[in-house]
Amino acid sequence: MEPAIRAEGVGRTFNRTLKAVDNVSFTVTPGEAFGFLGPNGAGKTTTVSMLTGNLRPTAGRAVVDGVDVFHHPEAVKRRIGLVFQEQTSDSDLTGRENLELAAALFGVPRRDATATIDGLLDRMQIGDAADRLTKTYSGGMRRRLELAVGIIHSPRVLFLDEPTLGLDPQGRAGFWKYVQELRRDHGMTVFVTTHYLDEADSICDRIAIIDHGRIVATGTPSELKDHLGGDVITIRPAREDRSLEAVLRAVPGVLSVASQDGAFRVKAPRGEELIPPLVNACAHAGIGLAGVSLKRPSLDEVFLEFTGREFREDEGMTATDRAVRVGQVQRAFGRGGR
């Protein structure tokens, strides 16, 4: 089966020296929900921009829905759906007018447009507000409207770039409900970047983690968690003590010990059973502790393991991401590419 998305050695260098994306390769199978995670500045936005035909690469090859993105970017734009983090619907148009405009831009036959629009308004539960200006919509309503805009032409591949950032939990849950329905009813392939690891964990069939422009891990959420090898106990000493790592490693049952920001991350199969022996070992060594915490395997821990950084939902975009995103919006909307 031909992949819905194939990236082969894709790269992008800015100003001849800054490698925002470096030799990125992966495939996404038809109907799959594929998560693309990474710290800010890791290359997520740049990669999405290249895969959607909004940014020229400096290396590699990518095929989306059977079309070579780098040689035929405009053809790809007509075949995919795309929902940005930023609100892109026109506030001075009604919901229906926004969809009518999108239908015209995507070349949806006029004889089909009305029924398609009515169906989407109903499916997204904004039919009652269809003839209101979108400036009066709540955040969740606007997200659902923009999802409807993104699928007005029935694409087989849907790109979601931080689509729920800023929504409350109810709004996020509602948005993903409709995405899952699209996958179930139409076999749509979904490529998503998100700042919410719980979304990636529950929605994505597979996940790739990118850091410093390179893919550092790929697998199902379960496979990535299994890589951790057990629970993670964080031991934070009251003061720096170079002997602490050796003390922790000597405790039976410890799988590994790694230092992180002045603390030590201890892996163990049954963390709750190992905490007392670890604390006792520190006490016998005369090492005071400022804190001890236990975490079950989670995508947060996976992220920390592969990137060396905690995942922070509230980080702002980097300057590079912001510049790429502005260009992405301008090309996709401002110049009629969509």
Image (cartoon, rainbow, N blue to C red):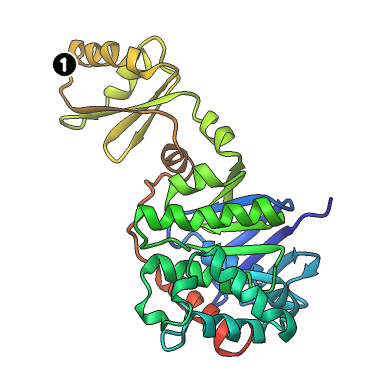
Element on which disc 1 rests: loop
Which residue is found at the position 46% from the left and 68% from the top? 143
> For residue 52, what is the image quadrant?
bottom right
* Along the viewing direction, whichever of 99 and 248 lies nearer the viewer: 99
The quarter of the picture where the C terminus appears is: bottom right
Residue 104 lies, in percent from the top left, at 66, 87
Q: Is residue 224 visible?
A: yes
The amino acid type, in three-letter code, at marker 1 is Gly
Which residue is found at the position 71% from the left and 59% from the top? 7
Residue 269 lies, in percent from the top left, at 45, 17
Residue 195 lies, in percent from the top left, at 43, 55
Q: Is residue 158 above or below residue 270?
A: below
> For residue 313, what is the image quadrant?
bottom left
Residue 286 lies, in percent from the top left, at 16, 16
Left or right: residue 71 compared with residue 44: right
Left or right: residue 229 compared with residue 57: left
Pointer 1 local density, CA inside 10 Å: few below 14, some 14–19, many at least 20: few
> For residue 250, what is the image quadrant?
top left
Residue with the mark numbered 1 = 286
Q: Is residue 187 above or below residue 123?
A: above
